[in-house]
Image (spheres, rainbow, N blue to C red):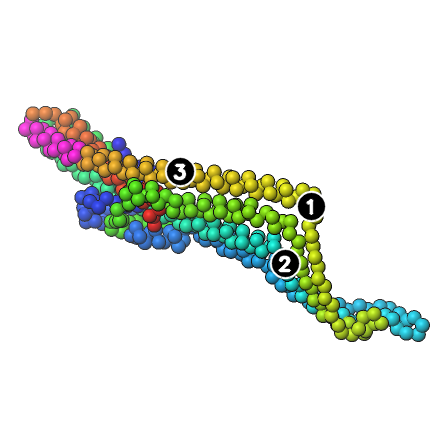
Amino acid sequence: MRFTNSSAACVVLTASLSATGAWAQSPSLQMELATPATRLTMEEAIGRALARNPTYATALLEVRRAEAVVRETKAAWLPTLDGNGGVTHLDGNRVENGAVILAQNELTANLTLTVPLLKTRQWLSTAESRLDADATSAERKDVRRTVAFATGQAYLAVYAQKFVIEVDERAHDTAKQHADYAHQRYAGGIGNSLDEVRAAQEVATDEALVEEAYAGLAAAEEALGILTGTEGPVDTAGEANVAEPPSLQEGLDGAAHRSDVVALDAHLRSARKVVKDEWSDYMPSVVGVAEPFYESPATPTVPLRGYQLELLLTVPLYDGGLRYGQHDEHRALHDEAGVAYTAGLRKARSDMRAAFESMRRADSALRSSRDAAKLAEQALELANLAYRAGAVTNIEVIDAEREARDAETQAEVAGDTARQARLTMLAATGHLP
C-alpha cells in the first residue's frame, strides 16, 4: 500500500511517530530535490495562506463590496446638493414695446438642495443591506476556516511524505545489505547466481520507490506553495502540533456557532427582515427642495437673485403589480434561507459525529499498524538469520523485506490518517484556525 498526498491533515498526534527525529537528522534528503523549498512551520503556513491565498483575499474583497452597498443605500435618504450654471447667447435682444424682455446674453446659476424628509422604504433598505453585509462577513470567516483546513492538509501531505521517503530509503538500505551479502556468498562459491539476481532486483525496485516518493514530495511541496501564496515549493519546518480537539458533546452543543452555520443564520435573518419590511413599499415619501438662484440680467418675471422652496409628496398608488411580485420573491427567498439553515445545522452535527468516529477508529488502526510494523521487522531479522544459517533461501528474505516495507508504509499512512482525523474534528467543530 502506497501513501498518496490526497489525504493529509494539519495536525499530529501528541505522540508523533518516532521517525520524526530520524528525518530531522537527514538533511541530505531535502538536498535531493531540484528546487529549494521555503521552510515554514504549520502556524506560519496557515498564517501566510490567510494573508496571501486568493480565495480568502476574494472573501475580504466581498466584505468591502458589501460595506459599499450599505453606503450606497444610505445615500438614498441623505441630503444632496447640486450646482447648475448656464450661459445663453441670442442673435440680439428681444424687445417688446421698447422694453427688453430677453437679453442677448443671459447668465444663470442655481444651487439645488434636496432633503428627504420621509423615506421609509429607503431607511429600511439600509438596515436590510446592513444585515446582508453581516452575512457576507460571516461567510468570510467560514472561508478562513476552509482555507486553513486546506493549507493544513497540504502541510501534512508534505510532512507525511517525508516519513514515506524514510521508510523507502530504509528498505533500500536493507535490500542493499542483503544484495551485498548474496554477492559475497556467490563470489565465495557457497551461493548461487539466482539469489544474487533476486537480491539485486529488490534493490532496483526499492530505488524506484524512493524516486517515486521524492516525486510525490515535490508535488506536495508545490501544492503547499500554491495555497500559501508562495512562489515555489514550501517545506515543513519541525513538527505540526495542535491542541486536542474538543469532545463530541462539546462540538454538538456548539454546532450553531460554526462559521458556516452562522453565515446561513445571518442570511436567514436578512431574508426575514426583508419580508418583515414589505409594508414600507406602500408608504408615501416626502422630499423638501430648496433652490437659490442668480440670473443676469433680471427679467420682469425673474429677479436678479432669489430662491424657491418646494415640498414634494409622492404616494405610490399603482405600479402594475411590481410590489406583489417582489413580495412573493422575498417570501420564497426567506423559505429557501430557512431550508438552507436547517440543512446546514444538520450537516454540521453530522460532520462532527463522523469526524469523531473516524478519529476514534484511526487511533485504533494506528496502534495496530505500529504493532504490525514491529512484527514485520522482527520477521525480517529472523529471515536474515535463517538465510545466513542456510535454513532458507533468499526468497523468504525478500518476501520479509517487502512485507516489512509495506507494514512500515502502512504505519505511516495510519499515522497520517490519525492526524487527518484530528484536523477534521477541529474543522468540524469550528476550532480551526
Q: Position of residue 224 (x, y in %)?
A: 35, 47
Q: Residue at coordinates 84% horizontally, 68% vertically from top-left? A: 90
Q: Nearer the viewer, residue 62 or 49?
A: 62
Tell me if mark 3 has few (under 14), some (14-19) or many (20+) residues whose alpha carbon lies within 10 angstroms of its own. Answer: some
Q: Residue at coordinates 70% horizontally, 66% vertically from top-left? A: 290
Q: Nearer the viewer, residue 56 or 116?
A: 116
Residue 334 in magenta?
no
Q: Position of residue 57 (x, y in %)?
A: 44, 52
Q: Mark 2: which amino acid?
A: Leu
Q: Which residue is mark 2?
A: 118
Kindly give the residue lying farthest to the right in the view shown.
Answer: 97
Q: Mark 1: which amino acid?
A: Asp
Q: Which residue is mark 3?
A: 346
Q: Earlier in the sequence, mark 3 or mark 2?
A: 2
Tell me if mark 2 has few (under 14), some (14-19) or many (20+) residues whose alpha carbon lies within 10 angstroms of its own. Answer: some
Q: Main secondary structure of the magenta part?
A: helix
Q: Mark 3: which amino acid?
A: Arg
Left or right of residue 170: residue 72: right
What is the quadrant of the N terminus in the image?
top left
- Relative to 98, does residue 339 appear above or below in the rendering? above
The answer to whether residue 7 is seen in the rendering is no
The span from disc 3 to disc 1 (Cα, nearest Å) is 42 Å
Q: Position of residue 132 (x, y in %)?
A: 51, 50
Q: Residue at coordinates 83% horizontally, 72% vertically from top-left? A: 299
Q: Secondary structure at mark 1?
A: loop
- Observer-side mark, 3 or 2, equals 2
Left or right of residue 403: residue 6: right
The span from disc 1 to disc 2 (Cα, nearest Å) is 20 Å
Q: Earlier in the sequence, mark 3 or mark 1?
A: 1
Q: Which residues are magenta?
A: 371-390
Q: Which residue is mark 1?
A: 319
Q: Earlier in the sequence, mark 1 or mark 2?
A: 2
